[in-house]
Amino acid sequence: MLIVAERINSSRRSIERALEANDVNLIQAEATAQAAAGADYIDVNAGTFIGDELDRLKWAVEIVQEAVDLPICIDSPDAAVIEAVVPLVKRSPMINSITLEPLRLEGILPMVAEHGTKVIGLCQSEDTMAESAEEKLQLASQLVERVTKAGIPLDDLYIDPLVYPLATNPQSALATMDGIGRIMEEFPGVHTICGLTNISYGVPKRKLMNRTFLVTAISRGLDAVILDPTDNHLFGALKAVLALISKDEYCIDYIGAFREGRLE
């Protein structure tokens, strides 16, 4: 299960303030904590800095790489920003993200092919943000077609079927889980990824909803996730479900997490 750590994102007020103030200690503490908690990639996002995103993102990427030896997930919809940041990374990154919108797809996909990066592909086009399982499968099919035509192996594509708040779309969780299962069955070798927090927006006890959704999504085939690995309740649910679906033989990782005091 691939974990993309989400905490260094300027949509969080503490991170936005740290980026404004060039607070090296806070950013590096976040990176170090997430690496120690089991992250595979550190997502870095400076998207709230309209007009100044590139400089903030460059600084953050360099600071994070001073603190940890994990690859970066470069998080921006702007192809020019990504193109400027890719040469700064020490290890092959993940790019977050492409859609089927022509400007975004044509701006970012050639970089993915040239640099051999991994890429998150959202089930979104110019006129559609996939809601039903069928829409998710259709847009995933188009992503697979465009990515493979560009010479990018399916193993480098992480499809995000998009999940919406249950408070406004009561069928979203079911549609997303069904979409994950159908995508993984239809396109062997591709990956699926999901951010958790959208599902719980507008309802109480959000963390409970997030980790329950994570467990059910993994049971349908989800094999990568964008989350906060320092949340031990969430991390424990992740380790438990992987053991239950035979992705952790003899519960070795689960027992290891228990011994580390990570299960709550």
Image: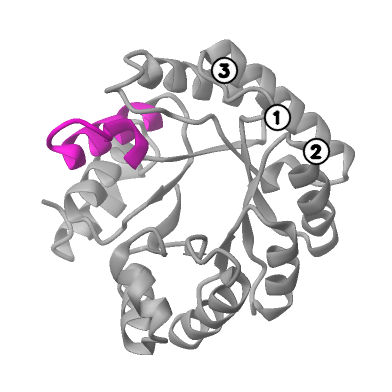
Q: Which residue is at a point 59% across and 11% down the rendered structure image? A: 134
Specify the amino acid type for callout 3.
Arg
Q: Residue at x 56, y 73 (%)?
A: 57
Give the number of the mark in front: 2 or 3.
2
Highlighted range, magenta: 197-218
Q: Nearer the viewer, mark 3 or mark 1?
A: 1
Q: Is residue 27 above or below residue 174?
A: below
State the image coordinates of residue 62 (x, y, percent, origin top left): 55, 84
Local secondary structure at mark 1: loop
Q: Which mark is residue 171?
A: none
Which residue does the numbered mark 3 point to in the structure image? 182
Q: Which residue is rendered at x = 42% and y = 78% of the image?
A: 19
Q: Is residue 205 magenta?
A: yes
The reply to whether the C-beta atoms of the residues labelled 2 and 3 are less than 8 Å apart is no
Residue type at the position of mark 1: Glu
Which of the pair 204/231 is nearer the observer?
A: 204
Q: Are marks 1 and 2 in contact (CB under 8 Å)?
A: yes
Lower position in the chain sequence, tag 3 or tag 1: 1
Q: Which residue is mark 1?
A: 126
Secondary element type, mark 3: helix
Q: Is residue 201 magenta?
A: yes
x and y, in percent, of residue 8 in the image: 40, 66
Could you tell me how far apart the alpha carbons at marks 1 and 2 are, in whole angstroms?
A: 8 Å
Residue 227 horizontal/vertical position (percent) = 36, 51
Q: Which residue is mark 2?
A: 102
**Residue 75 placement: quadrant:** bottom right
